[in-house]
Amino acid sequence: MAGGCIIGTCPVCDDLVFEDEWQMTNDEKIVHEKCLLHAEFNQEETDIIADLQKRLDEKDKQVASLLRIIREIEQGAHPKLFKNQIQRIMKGSGESES
């Protein structure tokens, strides 16, 4: 059971933090010892999700660009006119994958 003085509120679980159960995060927030591991794990997940969202946004832009080219070709434009544009789009696709 925690004891001593209350030194703050844990930003992870929103419970009170007592003087005998705290740790400090890298950004100088006071958290429960048990919450610190949970918060670090969640930050790693958050970073992964942000990276995946960025990649997805890039792919959406590439698809949109290719669809615009396809529409122009369907309306009678010659495909050779878009060769360089398509190569740039596809090159961007290769750079973002690792």
Image (tube, rainbow, N blue to C red):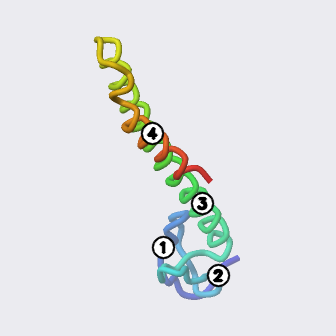
Tell me what residue is drawn at x 52 percent, y 71 percent.
Answer: 10
Which residue was labeled with disc 1? 9
Which residue in the rendered view is the most extreme toward the right?
A: 1
Tag in front: 3 or 4 = 4
First reached walking from the N terminus: tag 2 or tag 1: 1
Which residue is label 3 attached to?
42
Q: Nearer the viewer, residue 41 or 32?
A: 41
Q: Which amino acid does label 4 sit on?
A: Gln
Marker disc for residue 87 = 4
Residue shown at 64%/86% (left/top)? Answer: 20
Cα distance between the residues tagged 3 and 1: 19 Å
Distance in Å between CA atoms under marks 2 and 1: 12 Å
Q: Say which label, 3 or 4, has the lower sequence index.
A: 3
Q: In this view, does 15 lie to the left or right of 37?
A: left
Q: Are marks 1 and 4 in contact (CB under 8 Å)?
A: no
Q: Closest to the observer: 85 or 66?
A: 85
Query: Of label 3 and label 1, which has the lower sequence position?
Result: 1
